[in-house]
Amino acid sequence: MNREIAALLHEVLSQPETSREDWIAAACADTPQTAAELRELLRRDAQGGGILDRPLGVLAKGLQLNVDDPAQELIGRRIGPYRLTALLGSGGMGVVYLAERADAPFEQTVALKLVRSEKLHGEAQARFARERRILACLSHPHIARLIDGGFDEQGHPWLAMEYVDGEPLINWCNARKLGIEERLHLLLDLCDAVEYAHQHAVVHRDIKPSNVLIDRSGTAKLFDFGIAKQLDEEHSDTFATETRARLLTPAYAAPEQIHGDKVTTATDVHALGLFLYELLCGRRAYGSQSSAQFDLLREILERDAPAMSMRLLAAEPPVAADIAAERGLNERMLQRVLRGDLQAIVAKALRKEPRARYRTVAEFGDDLRRYLDGEPVLAVEGARTYRLHKFVAQHRVAVSLAAIAFLCLLTALIGMTWLGHELRLKAERADQQSRTAVATRDFLLDLFKAASPERTLGKIPDAVELVDIGARRAASQLDAQPELQAQLLGTLGNVYVNLGKYDTALATLEKARGISAIASGDDSAATMQLDIDIAYATYMAHKNSDQIRPLLDHVIAVQRQLPVGQRTLLVPALTKLGLVELDRAQYASAEKALREAIDLARSQGNAGERRLMDALLALSNAFGLTQQSSKTVPLLREATAIADRTLPAGDPDRNNLQVNLAAMLALNGQPAEAEKLLRDAVETQKRILGEQHPQYLVSLVTLADILMRERKLDESETLFKKTLALAENLDKTGDVTILSLRRLALVKQQLGDPAAALPYAERALEAAKGKYGEDNANTLDAGSTLVDIRFRLGEYAQAEAMAHGILARTERLNMAIMTSTTSIRLGQTLRMDGRPAEGMPYLRRALDTLNASRGERNLDSLTALLELAKAQRDASNFDAAREQAQKALRFAPDPLPADDSRILQARAVIAQLDYLQGRCSETSLSDLETLRKRIERDTPKATAAIAGVALTASLCKRQMQGHAAADAENEAAIRAYAKDILQTAIVDPFSRKLAKQELGTK
Amino acid sequence: MTQLQTDAALPGPAAQMLFNQVYADLRKRARTLLASHQTSSLNTTALVHEAYLKFGRSPQSPSSALHFFNAASVAMRQVIIDHARYLSAHKRSADAVVTLDGHLNEEGAMNVSETMRLSDALEALRAGDARLAQIVDLHFFAGLGFAEIAKLLDVSLSTVERDWRTARALLYRDMAE
């Protein structure tokens, strides 16, 4: 019955009011009782005003007690020196009155805030006191001043604040039809105020239109740091979580506020972004007039704010034309403004992740000023980076790809300076790759959502699959949009480059260029960008390298003819040219191009910063390659500063630079600063990325490397063991695993424990072979470490065989420096094996190659000279040996100090030759003594080496005394040394020969 | 609490647990506010949304939001009606309420009896047309706007508005009888 009557009533109510009676009469013609009931219910409907028409709160309150509004009761009362004259409103947990100074001869009107609660006193009072302390610290023309404060008779605290008789800023602007520029200037005042508060460690947390008033003089004032809190009082606000929801104004809340996460200065940046949004486009960024609160919250958490130009068109009053009129514009003009750089600025301020927003309010303000000055804004540049960041965060595969590229760079830079040109160049390219890779991958993400892991049942599609899908789609589906098609194919081409598929890359890029040339013209920016890409891909592919220069030269020439402001591709083209020239070992012209790129990028100010960073890095690579590593430091410092400024902490490029800088500092005798920088970087990464992140690992490896250079071997070993454990956990055959193994082998070597180094080196080599193949610098490097260890262990036959194997490959791969270092080791091995003459050709060739490629004064040449001298000595070519040793001596005092151990060794070789040629002198004696002391100091465990030098010294002494029996003590010493030497398994054949002669002649 | 267990909107044990939590929370909050003498009227809408923030923090599907607000409205109803029942049982007379400072308060008494009549009428309505009763719960007790309800129930705004007016008219009539 009830249900039927309800259905009928529902029906009646859907009729227009005037025709309801007719409807009832018609529908209930046969049931007059129902008709009467319906009429009665309609009367009830119209009556209203009952219990159901009042808010539930009123009922709830009525059930407990009923008093007059306590807030109203207090009007007229005196609080402190003030008399309350009117109720202004209640907010937060206090009531705000208009009050006047009651005791003073002058008139002063204030806004007086009174906390009335007794039940909440604990929390509220602490908060009130805090608020008062905070506000008292702030004195700024655009912040409403705190005038006074105290407690009333009942002990309720109160605050007297500057009273502003004004209206909300946005209303004020609309009423006066203020233009965009004037609005931005007002907002900049507000930014100053917020930045000022931030500098005093105060976050406002509730910036919204109703809290920003314009007073009679037209000055903007920021109000109500009601829920402001000192940043350093973070932990004392348990209460804030409890009341957070009530205090916050959802439409202006930042995601982190809704989540209850940490509120920071970035929260205010978000609020200012929302404020700017509304100030410009006349509508709130989120929610609509009818939207439910939970929808609003979800929107803030999940959806990017709609573009202002779209939002303007929302079907809500006021209409877009009216909003435009309020800004002194017509609708089309407003649309244009909203679509431009301001949209990028707003979007950057409104990012969901606090870290992705402007880092400070000042940066936000600066970008607005740049906009007003007609300069390029950072937000536009940042938008690309941001998208790729999101991608990197979501796709660990991509991250580890970038990390691998990054690792190659590290190996070259830090690793061993002798790793050679080729590897370095590869690494430098890898660095370029990682940058391009990251820049392009985000674009792919947008396009290939279909292939994202969420839609492929958790399988992460591999990069190649992804790109292949993309290339097919681009080629087949985008004919109607040739520009996009060209752009997409171009991007894919670059990705192929990064994946090392150069042929496909070039084919794709050429195709893109063809499309672009038809769609936009040969000399359009889009086409020339592709020219640059093609040049780069060709360079990477090591193909037709003579074609690269003309291509880049053409782009550069065309760019130079454009007005200065439009030469957008000049810096990247010059940077690429620099890289190509670097590859061709044309260092002078590389430097010239890169310097020009740097100067140009500098002249573009902030907008060119990222490109400046690239060019600086390229130039620092040029210097690194030409052994001018000291020149790299200032360049890397500048690049790092840019990265610190423009990239969020944890950004791969930024970390890359930091770590590069640290590596270069370490090479330049500033290991302490390098260590500190790296320790900072490592800490940051640990915090942001976590211990499992490949980048963190790579930095840790670098730190351990620097510690190794500083000869803090124990700590270095500990760190490498840690990186090994972490890396094996990630990937048992991964790059970092292999690198850690190699480094552990080296550290053990340097600790004088080749036996302990051996298993690490063997594992490293096996893993490297599996991972990189045999013809790879990493594998070869691991192999040469193993050669060193076998050599130290006296396993000469094995060392020899391995060294030959490595040499065959390095020669074929044209790896000059690695060929040289291995040749030296092979020469050494052969001499130790008692075949000095066989080793000499290898040593000579190494010396020639080194001298030719790096000049005669490089330290590897010194090692070769020294070994050659010893080999000649052992082969009894005394004069030749003396000549080589003399040459070695010329390395002191420049570049080496006279007491460098290699110089000491050269002197000792000369002294030994003196003995062999019967020319021992006091000088020979003292040179041998000096070396002995040095060996005793540096490697006290090397007893055989010490005995060897001491034996020669004693023999010299005997030679100088003229006859054998003269000095019994010396003779005893000679016998003792000789015995020691012959009892030692691994000993220099020269010492062994002398010892044998002595004991044999006996 | 007996009627809660038969509430059709709250089927499984998970929902029951949610309800218990929401109920305890709302009760605490409402009591705190009622006892504080601070607000001139209890903002139940804010209370419920606040609870939603607490319990439904992560964005949820409309159906789970509906579960939540169903639970919340029942909880609010319980807070109010329990309280009225308590007052009517423990005070000197069934139709007079003594305020904390000892004065007889006519309006308070009226509120108690009116609340009890509303409760009875609402249960009668629920028996006949659960949907209409749900609209009353969501709008009056949980403080949701019509637009919000329309979204939750996936019906048009005008339907919700007419449902409300229908329910209200029926309730007023029953309460007057």
Image: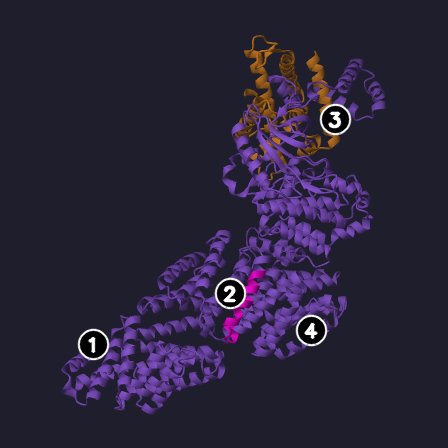
Say whether residue A516 is left or right of residue A800. right
Residue of label 2: A660
Q: Position of residue A47 (x, y in %)?
A: 76, 18
Dot placed on the residue nearer the N-terminal end, 1 or 2:
2
**Vertical order, A626 against A921 (above or below):** above
Residue of label 4: A556
Dot placed on the residue nearer the N-terminal end, 4 or 1:
4
Examine the rendering and report whether any part of residue A526 can be seen: yes
Dot placed on the residue nearer the N-terminal end, 2 or 4:
4
Mark 2 → mark 4, Cα distance in angstroms: 29 Å
The kind of residue on which mark 1 rests is: Asp
Label 3 element class: helix
Q: Nearer the viewer, mark 3 or mark 4?
A: 4
Residue of label 1: A980
| Chain colored orange | B
Residue of label 3: B162
Image quadrant for the N terminus of chain A?
Answer: top right
**Vertical order, A704 against A197 (above or below):** below
Q: Position of residue A78 (x, y in %)?
A: 63, 24
- The chain holding disc 1 is A
Task: Tell me what hue chain A is rendered in.
Answer: purple
The kind of residue on which mark 4 rests is: Ile
The residue stretch that appears in magenta? A624-642
Quadrant of the rendered image containing residue B176: top right
